[in-house]
Image: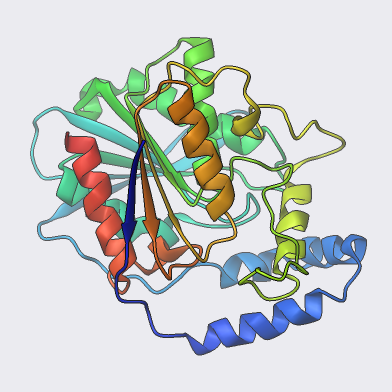
Amino acid sequence: MEYVEKELASKPVDPEDIDLTIMFKKMAKIPRFLLKFLLKKNIKKIREAMGGDSRDITTRPIITKDEYIPGYKSQVRIQIYSPETTQVRPLLVFFHGGGWIGGSLPAVEDYCKGVSDQADCVVISVDYHLAPEYPFPEGLEDSYAAIKWAVVNKDELNINLDQIVVAGDSAGGNFAAVICLMARERNEFSIAKQILIYTATNLVDQMIPDDAQDSPFPPGMMKVSAVMVDLYFKGKVDKRDPYISPVYAKDLSNLPPALIAVGDQDFLYKSSLEYAKKLDEAGNKVKFLLYKNANHAFIDDTGNSDQANDLVREAAEFIRN
């Protein structure tokens, strides 16, 4: 495994981050069953509050197109980004983060456009159905269906089917990792590479306890994250199912080369490194990027975050080479 640490300028503390810290401290005192009820009741407001402060970093026109395509059970919206030429290109299919209950295409648009520009590739960003209204496996299967649609429409998209890359951040990274397993098992298309950005790969024990002495996170944050995981499911599930926690797959061999990136202040840092090591031990090519002083969801600040801008460059290089 290639292991790289990067220390770049950190983004100044946002006053809204201080407000979130206060909110998480209050949530730490709320019983888990009640917190789950409150999150479901206020799901619309929670979704509206997600996202960062990004801006366009492209250096040339990138065509943006909306489409509605067949999903798992109903239509799914996608956004397609592509440079203004007609040559056949690699395809990157991106799945946004948001704890399976939120996130959006606009939150990751500038990141996706930046990669399209610098990698000279087509990018499809998938607006999969969200929990709790659409629990597992709907969002996952929507995301898989988007790749199947792209394969069928390869001529219209001008994509090379030998250069399909999957990527995602956080919950979306979970989908990207799982879809690599699904593609290997279902044999309907081939994935050439995977890009996993602060990815949730272990839903059993990925979280650092709120009371851990070395935890850099405000009290309550881990409880909220655990409740988001609860909302992803309907009824009892085995969280060791590889389609939920890919780190528990019995066989991780013969998977696409992986670029795995995470910040050292991210609660998914340890589980991201664990998955990178397991992929490496199974004989897969892995590059692990650790961004010093970086927290969760930094690609939402593309254009205003040195870490996010660097990861655009790293992802583009990984796709091209």
In this rendering, the answer to whether 165 lies above or below 99 is above
What is the quadrant of residue 23 in the picture? bottom right
In this rendering, the answer to whether 282 lies above or below 202 is above
| Relative to 256, 123 lies left or right | left
User: Which colour style is shown?
Assistant: rainbow
Rendered location of residue 248, percent (x, y): 65, 28
Instruction: Tell me if residue 41 can be seen.
Output: yes
Name the residue rendered at 59%, 40% in the picture.
Answer: 201
Name the residue rendered at 65%, 35% in the picture.
Answer: 245
What is the quadrant of residue 44 in the picture? bottom right
Of residues 81 and 213, the one drawn nearer to the viewer in this rendering: 213
Name the residue rendered at 32%, 71% in the picture.
Answer: 305
Rendered location of residue 55, percent (x, y): 29, 70
> On the rendered image, what quadrant is the N terminus found in?
top left
| Relative to 32, 96 lies left or right | left
Rendered location of residue 289, percent (x, y): 36, 50
Name the residue rendered at 83%, 60% in the picture.
Answer: 36
What is the quadrant of residue 236 in the picture? top right
> On the rendered image, what quadrant is the C terminus found in?
top left
The mark tally for this picture is 0
In this rendering, the answer to whether 110 lies above or below 197 is below
Of residues 101 and 283, the one drawn nearer to the viewer in this rendering: 283
Instruction: Tell me if residue 144 can be seen.
Output: no
Of residues 182 and 91, the one drawn nearer to the viewer in this rendering: 182
| Relative to 37, 246 lies left or right | left
